[in-house]
Image (cartoon, rainbow, N blue to C red):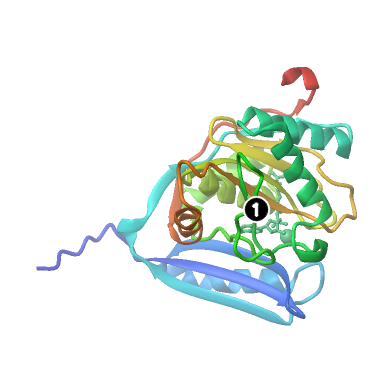
Amino acid sequence: MIISCPMMTSLYSVRMRASSHDQHLSGAERIVPVHAVAETTAALIERALSAPLGPPDKIHCNSEQIDPVTVQFAKLPDVHSYQVANVQEGRLAATQFLIEAGLSADCAALAVATLAEGAGPGGIVMRGAVLMDAVTGERLEHDPARGVRVSRMDILSTFRPDVEALLVAAGLGHHRVIEALVLSGKVLQAPGVVAELCWSDAPDYVTGYVAAPQCGYQRISQLKAAGDKRGGRVFFVDRSKVTVSALVDYLERQPVLFDAAGTIAPLKKWELEDA
Ligand code: WAQ
Ligand code: MG
């Protein structure tokens, strides 16, 4: 006998990626109930079309049903925001946070330098993230141009307005913040992840972050110079806890929905003594 549960609305993963001349421009990830698939798809395509770099020549939008019993529920990371004086200080703060998360100074510095120089082949921006061995600094992603793309994560749709209101009240209403927080929240849930380093490839968005399971999502006001088109993500993995293929599978395929928020701390000036 099949027992249907009326509480379990059918869920879909809706994913968009846009490119121009085969160069990745933008992407987005949502998990929504079936009745919101059409409007979500329209909103993501609208967003791709109005990208600041001009309309893409290709937009892929795909929706795929998710089995509700496979969904993991989780809490968003606590948010901390640090004001730094300049890029140098920001990168010093990032290095310090990575060391606090358990990385060696060499590995932390290598990751910062990798994003600073452009992590993809020939210094191009990758579509996804670098996967870095947390002990040796070795790069583990199979495709150095694509990297690892985190997918199938979102805020539970009934909870989204609450999270948006919390972030807006804290002065963090920019759509990049909520998206990065959700992505990072999933990365921190993943088995064997020690930390994440990120800053945007958008030339005008210079804030980035270091996230770690015990430390939360630590924003740093400036991690690159305005106008710099380089950006990216590095996920640090402890290979004594997980294999690369199991981790990549989790990051790409495991559906995660956030149904609780963490704390949001007020902006604080970063000082080396904090460390
Ligand atoms: N999975 C893995 N890596 C990704 C993904 C993904 N789904 N999406 C983007 N990336 C990588 C890719 O290399 C991009 O070039 C890079 O991350 C940056 O992506 O609190 O906006 O979307 O103020 O430009 C962080 C700070 C903003 C937000 C990050 O990233 C805040 C941002 P972007
Ligand atoms: Mg971008």
108 left or right of 189 in image: right
At a point 87% along the width and 39% down the height, the residue shown is 87
Query: Can you tell me which quadrant of the image ligand 2 is in?
Result: bottom right
Which percent across, then down, holds residue 7?
Answer: 28, 57
Specify the quadrant that holds the C terminus: top right
What amino acid is found at the position of numbered circle 1 in the picture?
Arg
Residue lying farthest top? 273
Which image quarter: residue 23? bottom right
Which percent across, then down, holds residue 86?
Answer: 89, 36
At a point 77% along the width and 51% down the height, the residue shown is 115
Q: Secondary structure at mark 1?
A: loop
Which percent across, then down, holds residue 43?
Answer: 61, 69
Seen in the picture, residue 48 relative to 254 is either above or below; the reply is: below
At a point 61% along the width and 69% down the height, the residue shown is 44
Seen in the picture, residue 98 relative to 71 is either above or below; the reply is: above
Residue at numbered disc 1: 139
